[in-house]
Amino acid sequence: MALKNRLYPTSLILSALWLAACSPASQQTTTESTVNPPIAEQRPFVVESPQGNRQDSYYWLRDDTRTDADVLAYLEAENAYYDDYRADYAELTATLEQEIISRIKQDDTSVPYQKGDYLYSVKYEAGKEYPIYIRADKDGNEQVMLDVNKLADGQSYMNVGNIAVSPNQQLMAYMVDNTGRRQYELRIRDLSTGQDNGQVLTGLSPAIAWAKDNKTLFVIENDPQTLLSTRVMKYRIGEPANTAELVYEEKDNTFYMWVNNTTDGEYIQINLDQTVSTEVHVLDADEPNGEFKALAPRERDFQYSADHLNGRWIIRTDLNAPNFQMMQVAHENIGDKSKWQPLVEHRDDVFIQDFAVFSNYLAINERSDGLRRIRIMPWNAPEEAKFIASDEEAYVTVFERNVQQDTDTLRYTYSSLTTPSTIYAYNMATGEQELLKQNEVPNFDASLYETARTWATADDGTKIPVSLLYKKGFKQDGTAPLYQYAYGSYGSSSDPYFRSTIFSLVDRGFVYAIAHIRGGQEMGRQWYEDGKLLKKINTFTDYIDVTEHLVAEKYAHPDKVFGMGGSAGGLLMGAVANMAPEHYRGLMAHVPFVDVVTTMLDETIPLTTNEFDEWGNPKYQPYYDYMLSYSPYDQVKKQDYPAILVTTGLHDSQVQYFEPAKWVAKLRTHKTDANPLMFKTNMSAGHGGSSGRFARMKEIAEEYAFILNLLK
C-alpha cells in the first residue's frame, strides 16, 4: 500500500537541497513509500584521540545550543519523513493509543503514608496529565500542596523531580524542570498560604535535604557544561538566592552526588557515588552550620551506603563481600571502617540489593536465583530471619516508602508480569499482612495470561534467565511473534514488573520476553562484572543467544522477532543490529547511546567522566580498540539491516540527541535493504520522552503500531 506523497514545509524542501547526497546508491526507500528519506550531508571532521584519529562525516549534527538552522532542519525533515510513513497506519496507532489509555485508572490516589500530623499521598484526576500532591490532617481535611497540572500550563514539558516537606511540615521545597534537560530550579512553598517564596535557585540536581531548624536547605549545584553534580550548597530560606553558601565541592569528576536526610531525620547525608567507589559524609541535622564528616574515606573498589538508627549506622557494603554484606558502627566511631561490626554475612548465592531499618527489625531486599525478595531479621534474634513468601514463579518485591522506624509494619510492593503493583503492610512480628492497595487496571483480566521462566545457554556455557509472558492457550509451535526487551548495563536489573501497555501486543499473539542478560545484577554482582568494560560484548551476545534459544524452543517464529531497548539498552539494539541483523524483523532503539568512543573521548559532554569504569576510557588501550569494536555508530557496515525505529529528545542530557541522529544518517548511506529506518526527535523533551502520562502512552502506541504494521 503506497503512502500519500505529501509536500514538506517549504523550509524542509529547501533544506533537502543540501541534505541530499545524490548518488543513487545512497537513496534508500522503504517498500511502502514513494518518498525518499532525508540524506544528511557529509562534512569532513577528524575526531582526535591519543590512540588514533577517525573521520566523522556527521559530526556537524552536534549543536550544543540546539539552535543551528541546518541541524534543526535535518531533524525536522526526519520527523516529517516518519510522519509521512506512519500516516498509512494512523488508524492502528489511534486504536492502540485508546487501548493503552483504557488500562489506566484515570482518577487514582496512592496509598497515604503518615508523617507527623499528616497523611501524604499523590492523586491523579481524570483527563489530567500530571500528579497532584496532597495531604490530610487528623480530621480528614485535604490540602492540595502542589498541582503539577497548573505548573504545566503553557509549558511543553514539565517535571517535578522531588518534593520535601520541612520537619515542622509548614514549608515544602520542590524541584522543577520545564525543558527535559534535568536541570532543576528550587522553589519554596509556604503550605499555610499556598504561596511560593520569591527566591528561586537554578541549575540544580533534584536532591533536597532539610536541617531541623526549618530554615536551612542543602541542595546540589550542577556544572553548567557537564551537568555533573559538583557542589553542595546551603541555602537559608528568605535570603537572596545568591547568598547560598558552598559547603562541599567534589573535585573528582568521576563521582555523582546526592543529598538526603536519614530515615529518622537526625542526619543530613552527602552521598558520593562512582561505579566502583562510594563515600558518605554526614552532618547532625540539628547543627546546619557544623562540618560534614565521612563515615569512611573513599577507596577504589570499596562501596557502601548507610542509614542511622538509635545512635548507630547500619551499612550495606562490598567490603570483602562482592555480593555485599550488612555491617554496623556506633556514631562515635565513624571515620574508621576497621570499627565496623558484621550484621549479615556475605553469601556467594545471594546479592543484597537494598535495606530498611526499624527499631526491632532489619529488612533486606535481596536477589537469589535471579528474583528479588525480602528477608526480615529481628535485631534480638538474627537466626530467626524469614522471607516474605510468593506463589508465583517470577515476581518482584521491593520496599515501599517506609518513613517511620518505630514500627513493626513494613510496607512493600509486590508485582509480576500478570500481577499489577500491589502494596502490602507486613507485620514483621506476626507475619500477617494487610492488602493496602492493588493498582486497578481497567480492561485487564489476569486469568487470561500465563508467565514462565526459561534459561538460554550462552556461547560460553552461562545460563541466561528469561522471563516470559503470553496469553493462555499459547501454542509453543514456532508461529508466534516475539517482543524481546533487555537493558544490561550499570548493574540495573530488568525485573519482571507488571507493564499494562504490553498487553496490546500479547493480546495480538505476541510472546513478551525479558532477557536478564549480563551487565545487570539479576544473578549477583559478578553478573554485572561480566557485562562491563572489557567484557561488555557479553551483554550483546547474551541477547542474541536468548533470541536463538526462544526461536529454537519454538516460542517464536524466526521471521517475527522484534527487539527493544532504551538508553544503554539502545546501545544494545545498535550492537545487535550490526552483529546479528538476520535474527530480527525489527528493532526499536529509544534514546540510544550509540556513538560510544567519540562521546567517551569528550569530557565536556554531560556524564562522560562518570562512565569510565562502566565502559572504559578510550584515551587508553586496550579500551579504545575494544570499545571501537562494538560501538554501533563505528561498526555500521554495508549489509542488510532489520526495520529500525529510533527515538530521541532534543534536550536529552543523558544521551545527547546527536548520537542517534548521526547513527541514522550513517545507516541511511550503508544499509543495503529496503526496510524502513525511521527517526523521531521529540523537540520539547529530554531523556525520558514526553512528561505527561497520556503523552507517554501515545509514544508507546506509535512503537507498537510500527511493529504491527511490519507484520501485515
Image (cartoon, rainbow, N blue to C red):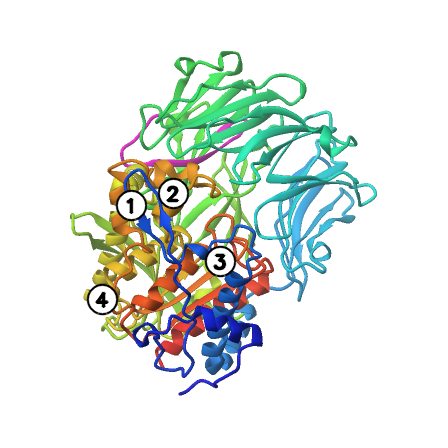
Reading the image, the residue beneath label 4 is 551
Which of the two marks, 4 or 2, is nearer to us in this view?
2
Magenta region, residue range: 345-361
Disc number lying in front (1 or 3): 1
Amino acid at pointer 2: Met
Give the residue number, with chain letter if any, for mark 2: 600
The residue that disc 1 covers is 627
Q: Residues within 10 Å of mark 3 (few under 14, many from 20)?
A: many
628 or 387, nearer to the observer: 628
Q: Residues within 10 Å of mark 4 (few under 14, many from 20)?
A: many
Q: Nearer the viewer, mark 1 or mark 4?
A: 1
Give the mark, 1 or 3, whose residue is nearer the N terminus: 3
Dot 2 crowding, Cα within 10 Å, few <14, some 14–19, many 20+ = many
Q: Residue at 50% across / 34% down in the picture? A: 429
Which tag, 2 or 3, sits closer to the chain's start? Answer: 3
Relative image position of residue 16 (x, y in whole percent): 47, 72
| Secondary structure at numbered mark 2 | helix
Read off the residue under disc 3.
420
Looking at the image, tell me whether mark 1 or mark 2 is earlier in sequence order. Answer: 2
Where is residue 183 drawn, in percent x and y?
A: 60, 44
Mark 2–mark 3 Cα distance, whole angstroms, equals: 39 Å
Real-space Cα separation, disc 1 to disc 4, in angstroms: 29 Å
Cα gap from disc 1 to disc 3, whole angstroms? 39 Å
Mark toward the start of the polypeptide (4 vs 2): 4
Residue type at the position of mark 1:
Met
Q: Residue furthest right?
A: 193
- CA separation, marks 4 and 2? 36 Å
Is residue 458 visible in this depiction of the protein?
Answer: yes
